[in-house]
Image (cartoon, coloured by chain):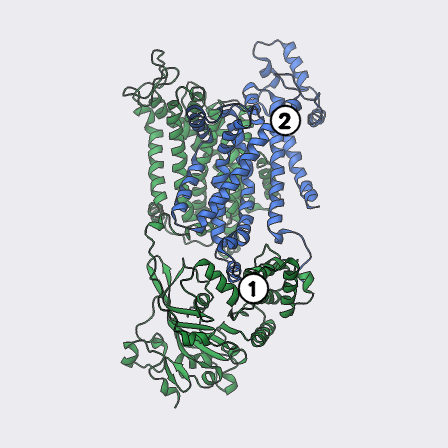
Amino acid sequence: MSLAQDMATDAPPLATRVVVAPSRRRWTLLRRVLAQPKGAIGLILVVLYLLLAILGPMLAPQDAFRQNFAQTLRPPSAAHWFGTDQLGRDVFSRVLVGARATLGIGVGGVAVAFLIGVPLGILAAWRRGWVEALLMRAIDIMLSFPDIVFALAVVAILGANTQNVIIAVGVVAVPVFARTARAVTLSILAEPYIEGSAALGASPARIILRHVQPNIAGTLLTLSTLLFASTLLSASGLGFLGLGTQPPYPEWGTMLGESRSYIRSHPYLATFPGLFLAGSALAFNLLGEALRVIYDPTSRRTSRRAPLFAFLRRRSAKPPAGPLDADSADRNAVSVKALRMAFRTRDGLLDVVRGVDLAIRPGRTLALVGESGSGKSTLLRAIGTLANPQEVAITDGAIGIGGESALGLSAVALRELRRRKIGVVFQDAASALNPVLTIGAQLAEAVRAGCGLDDEAVRQRCIDLLKDVRIADPERRLAMYPHQFSGGMKQRIVIAIALAQDPQVLLADEPTSALDVTIQQQILVLLREIQETRGMAMLLVTHDLSLVSRFADDVAVMYAGRIVESGEVATVLERPLHPYALALRASAPGGAESRGQPLRSIPGEPPLVGEFPDGCAFRPRCPRNQGRPECAECEPEPRAIAGRQVACLFAEEGLS
Amino acid sequence: MFVLRRLGGALPTLFAVSLLVFLFVDLIPGDPAQILAGPSASNEEVASIRKFLGLDEPLPTRYGHFIRGIWDPSAATSFRTHRPVVVELAERLPNTLIVSIGGLLIGVALGTLAGIVSAMRPGGLADAAITVLTLAGISMPIYWLGLLCIWLFAVNLGWLPAAGASTPAHFVLPILVIATRPAAMFSRLVAASLTETMGKDYLDTARAKGLSETRVVLAHALRNSLVAAVSVAGVQFGGMLGGSVVTETVFGIPGVGRLLVDAVSRADYPIIQYTILMFAVFFVVINLVTDLLTQWLDPRTREQERPA
């Protein structure tokens, strides 16, 4: 029951789905199935098998039942393509004739399961209460038997013949349909629009026909297809055991069972029925999987993976070039030069970071500010050497950490660099800690990496680290799991892990945006203190300009993958020269209104990655642009003006 | 503690299962005694079989008798061999346990390994090969696979014996054949949940510590993805076990599955009843083990004091 049960246990699929006209939807479905290689192959095979089941007996060249004792157990030949069996019957003809019984049992079994299971499942979801409780209990009990054992029991009660095998495999599959139908119906009934129509007085039957039926159809189609494959195998398994279709009627499983005695002397007897059986199960599994990709949103995780055989067409991005010039690299803890990064997509590379220069000196905090999608988190990951090369490519430029290049390193050198020099604090502490390991284990791992401390020393160091981030009672906390801590505590632990190897650079990616306001302040104060006492360089990524003046020394404003203005916090925030930085300050609470000006939002939308306008990317939203042709001509390069770097051709206008 | 409560929760199910299995004989259309005695039997013969089956006693008495048969060898005997059912089962149980548990363990191990490989390099050569093998594994009738293995390894190459259960070598092929289904299922589950886990922040936390990628995957990603894989697979382990019934027949292993198949074709009702009951109990135990495994893997499912 393999795949099908997998699906049933995944159950609650489908959110709201747009209902299209039935006829069009059918064609769309066919197109979507054929668009997937496995769907196309599966569908073609399934159609062939169904044709075989319908036409098989007519196509058979010889009488499948005629015995010929002069011609028993002959190998394949021109007269008997698949040879003859122990009674001299033509195996080819028997395989063709047997298609109807074999596939018929599958169809019948799935039909039985569908007709009993689906109404029960919908009924349970609709009535709830004792009906549901009873059904779920019954399903539990049925699932306590391995499926083939249950089918054997049914056959033992009813007797071995084709019809009873259909009933047996059908009954075995009822729970799968009932469970899925119940789960899907429940999730649909919980949709607000259904509650709406119930409130408007629509009758239950009408709601189920109008809303539940179209939404459940796809899931059930998928389930039926997958279940068909496993039902076919179970049914033929009974045949193989001699408890299915009875001789002389041909059925592939029964034929396999008969061939067992001749496997030593006449192995080809088992070859052809087995091949046809495996092929039909494969066909329905392929088709079922293709349908599942279409109908089951939980399988998106599978479809998000790179397509099969992608390795045949994968291109490598241009390796980043350019060593760091030694003089500036030595002084800076972080130095980024002309860095360009691009997302890998199906349509090629999409620029996300477009020529960024950045430097942080030891003992300073640089705040990187910008809207969501400006590329600031991508930049931080690249500096932390954590950019996933399968998702994003560094196409040009250089990154230096503590005077060492962070690009093009071997795996060992990269680990060494991360361990000694870089600490990272992520946005969401809840997801930055491994839920299945204790805090102690996760801290110890960071402490132990690359150094030979003994257990007691490691433990002492972990306790010290927890004290550093002001966690009370550290000895006891080590044995606890992340879910036993509050959000602020988790973030403190993440910070402790980042500090474990005394890094030179601390990278904090919106470290407080998932926390309460009061906790935010505590965490930032803590980070700032630690940074100052340890003399680290810190990169603080945030979209909240009001934090910058209190917690950073320098600021860099990022827009559409470029730094548009950077300099010391006092200089830049006092009088921003780039129109975007200006607008950002005006829109930040705590900045503008204290100067007696109204809080303003920035007009327009930030551009999407890959759709940046030519020339200055801020042009469409810029109050200073006003159709000036210069702005559209080229991307303005950063220039030094009034103690900072500004990338605006008309930056001087901000000074007046 | 948890084990006890969980077992307590399984008791109603077990009771219902035993009742169902007990009523099995009554579900047979017509008179079981008449069917067993055959069409030419005299009325006295039918009556004596009825008495032997205990069919003329009231239901509760018969149920009590049935339950007693679980431990009392004299309470239930096979129609055909007239030996106690318990003895028949006990003789064959070790073979079944070796084959099914061995197949399950090897399958899960292979599947996990394949899942890791395919999730590490999605779209790579290994991933493509594993995807194809997995689909084949799910679509392959294991009785055909068994026959092919006998033909190749026993008949042609002569490496392993074809049938029987007398030496350890006899168990190699059956275990490998049974392992295909769990291996295929687990490789898909692990690959899917590992792919999902690979995007988690805590892996980047681990990488930032300076751990090797292997360690990041094995110590951090794998355990988390196994949580998901095991809880989904829990329902399917039983189905995988069902494979032993067919496999024992293919390889001629005297096991419980083979006993059941023979009993069904010979209408040996007591054997059928107790064998099915045993499989059901077996299955309940496996579900329990799955639950315990999930708890061990994922501390969030353990009951503990609330957050500090």
Question: Label 2 lies in what chain?
Answer: B
Element at label 1: helix
Q: Which mark is residue B274?
A: 2
In this view, the residue in front, A504 or B147, is A504
Q: Which chain is green?
A: A
Q: Are marks 1 and 2 in contact (CB under 8 Å)?
A: no
| Residue A356 rendering spot, x and y as whole percentages | 39, 72
Q: Which residue is mark 1?
A: A429
| Residue B38 rendering spot, x and y as whole percentages | 57, 13
Answer with left or right where residue B2 lies relative to residue B182.
Answer: right
Q: Is residue B192 above or below residue B271?
A: below
Q: Which chain is blue?
A: B
Answer with left or right where residue A158 lies relative to residue A567.
Answer: right
Separation of disc 1 and disc 2 at Cα? Answer: 54 Å
Q: Amino acid at mark 2?
A: Tyr
Question: Label 1 lies in what chain?
Answer: A
Element at label 2: helix
- Crowding at dot 1, Cα within 10 Å, few <14 / some 14-19 / many 20+, comes out as many
